[in-house]
Image (spheres, rainbow, N blue to C red):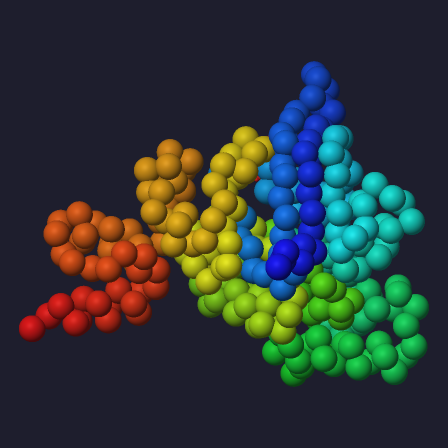
Amino acid sequence: MKQDSIISIKDLRLVYPTEDGEQVALDGITLEIVRGSFMSVIGRNGSGKSTLAKCLNALLLPTEGSVIIDGMDTREESHLWEIRRSAGMVFQNPDNQLVSAVVEDDVAFGPENLGLPREEIKRRVADALEAVDMTESRKMAPHLLSGGQKQRVAIAGVVAMKPEIIIFDEPTAMLDPEGRGEVLEIARQLHREGITVILITHFMEETIESDRILIMDAGRIVLDGLPAEIYREAERLEALGLRLPFAVEIAQRLRAEGVPLHADLLRPEELLEEIAALCP
Ligand code: ADP
Ligand code: MG
């Protein structure tokens, strides 16, 4: 059976005009993303990740090629608002996404723009705040919250639009480890509830739980596979300026020293269990 693609990208090129000519940001991307999947995108700065993200919700239109979101071509102007609703974006800096003086008003902003009935808006705001565990802070001013809490409010604002897809563009880059963990856990929870998640990150550690990892370099996809497949390409990753997840790197080094660990250990707990089992 053919798997159901929610995103279909064909021969996508994106060229920015610049003062002294042009900058090619995406150079021939062809990609199908399965509905309900969790995909991580990683690559060094300037590799085209944010540009790709912006192409997915029609903030940018292809210079060449096409981007189809749930059957809608991003070049069709009549689809613009439905594409923006169905493919929500969470950016690196939550301060740029929060617009109101009170948390719950901020979350209501999107649904209000959809012109929904009051009761429906109230219900969506309550559900979205519950989903990110921010119900207790609903009357607070966003600027008094921690970075992680602000990011959770920004996510609630997207969730309240009932999107099919959420694209997280380095959502943890400005957060402390605790905030990072919370935001990632919310992304995983939304995925379990059926939302297609695209997580752009520069922490390889954050890609472990994904169904698929895409590695970008200079506007192209250079690796595409399951986490275990990607992590086997240690030399390739190093050349791309990427580090392996901690447990994977330790396991590979131990194996190189002759310790009989099984292949494709991904998580610290798995590594610990294997090592403990080897000890007399
Ligand atoms: P990433 O998110 O992986 O760091 P970007 O998508 O932001 O990469 O950038 C890809 C390339 O496009 C880079 O070379 C960057 O300098 C360039 N670029 C991004 N935005 C613009 C812009 N508005 N105008 C010109 N060049 C841009
Ligand atoms: Mg970026």
Count of marks, rendered view: 0
Can residue 135 be seen from the camera position used here?
Answer: yes
Q: Is residue 124 above or below residue 262?
A: below
Vertical position of residue 199 compared to residue 235: above or below: below
Residue appearing at x 32%, y 38% in the figure: 235
| Residue lying farthest to the left in this orientation | 280
Residue 149, position in %: x, y?
60, 69
Quarter in which the N terminus is drawn: bottom right
Q: Quadrant of residue 93?
A: bottom right
Compared to residue 204, the image places residue 52 above or below, namely above
Estimate the x, y position of residue 253 in percent, counting from the top left.
21, 49
Residue 232 appears left or right of 171 = left
Position of residue 151 relative to residue 130, above or below, is: above
For the point 63% across and 36% down, the residue is 29
In the picture, measured across the screen, residue 212 lies left or right of residue 269, that is right
Q: Is residue 158 rendered to the left or right of residue 245?
A: right
Name the residue at the front extreme. Answer: 1
Instruction: State which quadrant residue 275 falls in.
Output: bottom left
Q: Nearer the viewer, residue 227 or 142?
A: 227
Closest to the observer, 46 or 265: 265
Give the position of the C terminus as an image quadrant: bottom left
Left or right: residue 60 versus residue 198 is: right
In the foreground, 61 or 173: 61
Q: Quadrant of residue 59?
A: top right
Residue 219 appears at what percent x and percent y?
A: 58, 33
Frontmost residue, 126 versus 232: 232
Q: Residue at x 12, y 52 (%)?
A: 258
Residue 102 in sight: no
At horizontal 60% and vertical 37% (from top left) the residue drawn is 48
Q: Residue 65: horizontal and vertical position, in percent?
A: 73, 34
Outermost top residue: 20
